[in-house]
Amino acid sequence: GIQVEQSPPDLILQEGANSTLRCNFSDSVNNLQWFHQNPWGQLINLFYIPSGTKQNGRLSATTVATERYSLLYISSSQTTDSGVYFCAVGGGTNAGKSTFGDGTTLTVKP
Amino acid sequence: GAGVSQTPSNKVTEKGKYVELRCDPISGHTALYWYRQSLGQGPEFLIYFQGTGAADDSGLPNDRFFAVRPEGSVSTLKIQRTERGDSAVYLCASSLTPGTRRYNEQFFGPGTRLTVL
């Protein structure tokens, strides 16, 4: 099956700083999503981005499908951005299932 | 409903008991997924339904785990003879019908935290 690696595993920032989270995957995909898991465990959809670039406020994401990676950019970070960020990919014959990485734990300090 | 709902939010049981976890998907979503998340890890796929049928159950760890979706809406994940290693958060997600734009964009419920003592 598809392998998903996220880096870095942990990231500590001061409020206002920018960051880049990376997701590498081992095979072609037809589905890639970025999620933020809040302290209560809820997975919040950030981006559906199997290819291309999208922006939503202070967050943006880019997926280069041919090179099998995706990047999530967080600008002017706030304490409320803290939590775990997951990349999930799906594709091939098992289009229904998604494979998650182990996440990046982001801590934003005031 | 507005989002995916799961009940109960927490379930504590004893080793060897039977448990049922329920998922109510977003109205109009024909695809439904179950995942399991252990502490410090990403969710792991268990099973995927398209309508009433299980399209992919390759993630079910063993035959103690079973899931149904008899009317193509609500789904129940059933775990027999629970073991301490089954303790985890069980997450449910739903998505639109294949062929629809962004059909495989998944939306998750809040999860059921299962603790097996």
Image (spheres, grey):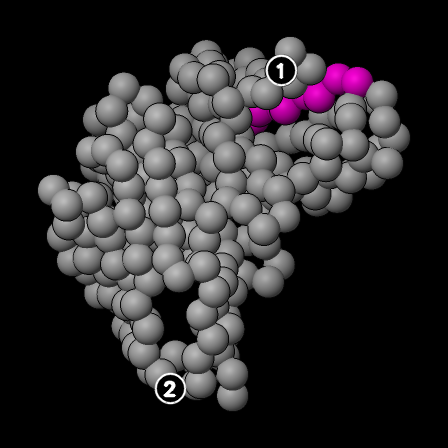
Dot 2 and dot 1 residues touching (CB under 8 Å): no
Query: In which quarter of the view is residue B60 placed?
Result: top right
Provide residue B16's location: percent of width, then percent of height.
Answer: 85, 21
> What separation in Å lies between label 2 and label 1 (alpha carbons)?
47 Å
- Please give the name of the residue rendered at 15% of the width and 49% of the height, measured from the top-left corner: A64
Q: Chain of mark 2?
A: A
Secondary structure beneath dot 1 equals: loop
Look at the image and tell me in which quarter the C terminus of chain B lies: top right
Highlighted magenta segment, given as a residue range: B72-81
Q: Position of residue A29 (x, y in %)?
A: 23, 35
Disc 1 residue type (three-letter)? Asn
Q: What residue is shown with label 1?
A: B62
**Which residue shows up at 42% across the image and 45% down it?**
A101
> Residue B24 or A67: which is nearer the viewer?
A67
Q: Is residue A51 magenta?
A: no
Q: Residue at x 20, y 44 (%)?
A: A68
Q: Is residue A78 above or below residue B47?
A: below
Q: Nearer the viewer, residue B53 or B24?
A: B53
Q: Is residue B79 left or right of residue B52?
A: right
Residue A19 at least partly seen: yes
For the point 25% across and 65% down, which residue is it?
A60
Dot 2: element: loop
Task: State the count of labels.
Answer: 2
Give the amino acid type for the residue marked by disc 2 in the picture. Gly
The verdict on a common chain for dots 2 and 1 is no
* Res. B103 in view: no
To which residue does mark 2 refer?
Answer: A16
